[in-house]
């Protein structure tokens, strides 16, 4: 059976990664494993922005895809961007096999607030489900509670559920 493979990009909190692996395994009903190599993102750093280009990370991730890959999800604590946006929480290949998600701006500390591990983990799960949804051909959803709702700020993530609404779930099951 093909696996959901989690690939650490740079230094990633090991406890958070293992928690996410288990949670995504339960959400998607596929075996999930953490790959032992860590992707070195240093070539995707753009010095003038001090951010990492998510499309370049996705491109570099392709070499880890093999016959046992269901989906490959890169996880990073680094700040990601694409050129037209200030930042992104993640990026996915629409209908493809890979996605990357960042928890840099999911941390309460980023906003000057005390750390909250449970909140961070829940936000990371929602955004991981969101990006994996794009790999299942799902587009953004108008139901603000659905994991596929667009979110450009953490406040919008916090009102989302970590699952798909009925419509998105039905569409995802057609392509999974
Ligand atoms: Zn999206
Ligand atoms: Zn939906």
Image (spheres, rainbow, N blue to C red):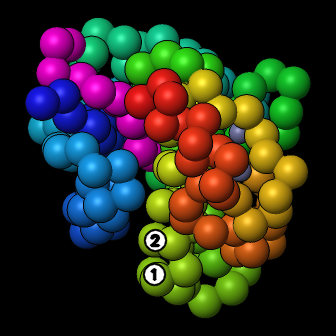
Q: Is residue 158 above or below residue 41?
A: below
Mark 1 vs mark 2, CA separation in Å: 6 Å
Q: Nearer the viewer, residue 48 or 140?
A: 140
Residue 162 seen in render: yes
Tell me which residue sits at (72%, 80%) in the image. Answer: 112
Pointer 2 local density, CA inside 10 Å: few below 14, some 14–19, many at least 20:
many
Tell me which residue sits at (82%, 62%) in the image. Answer: 144
Q: Is residue 79 left or right of residue 150?
A: left
Q: Is residue 44 left or right of residue 11?
A: right
Residue 108 painted magenta: no
**Where residue 169 sits: x, y (%)?**
57, 47
Residue carrying label 2:
121
Q: Are marks 1 and 2 in contact (CB under 8 Å)?
A: yes
| Residue sticking out furthest to the bottom | 114
Q: Nearer the viewer, residue 21 or 114?
A: 21
Q: Nearer the viewer, residue 39 or 139?
A: 139
Q: Is residue 77 left or right of residue 46?
A: left
Give the image quarter of residue 108.
bottom right
Give the dominant element type of the magenta stretch: helix, strand or loop: strand
Q: Is mark 1 within 8 Å of ligand 1?
A: no
Q: Is residue 34 above or below residue 161?
A: above
Q: Is residue 77 left or right of residue 79?
A: left
- First to last magenta residue range: 66-76
Q: Quadrant of the C terminus?
A: top left
Residue carrying label 1:
117
Tell me which residue sits at (52%, 85%) in the image. Answer: 116
**Where residue 85 sits: x, y (%)?**
85, 33
Q: Nearer the viewer, residue 132 or 42?
A: 132
Residue 42 seen in render: no
């Amino acid at each position: 059976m093909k696996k959901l493979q989690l690939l650490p990009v740079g230094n990633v909190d090991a406890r958070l990664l293992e928690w996410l692996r288990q949670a995504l395994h339960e959400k998607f009903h596929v075996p999930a494993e953490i790959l032992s190599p860590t992707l070195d993102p240093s070539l995707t750093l753009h010095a003038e922005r001090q951010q990492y280009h998510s499309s370049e990370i996705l491109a570099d991730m392709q070499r880890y895809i093999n016959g046992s890959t269901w989906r490959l999800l890169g996880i990073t604590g680094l700040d990601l961007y694409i050129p037209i946006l200030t930042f992104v929480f993640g990026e996915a290949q629409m209908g493809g096999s890979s996605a990357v998600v960042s928890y840099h701006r999911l941390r309460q500390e980023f906003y000057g607030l005390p750390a909250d591990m449970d909140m961070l983990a829940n936000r990371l799960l929602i955004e991981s489900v969101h990006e994996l949804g794009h790999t299942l051909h799902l587009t953004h959803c108008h139901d603000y509670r659905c994991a596929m709702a667009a979110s450009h700020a953490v406040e919008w993530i916090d009102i989302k559920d970590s699952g798909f609404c009925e419509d998105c779930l039905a569409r995802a099951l057609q392509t999974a």
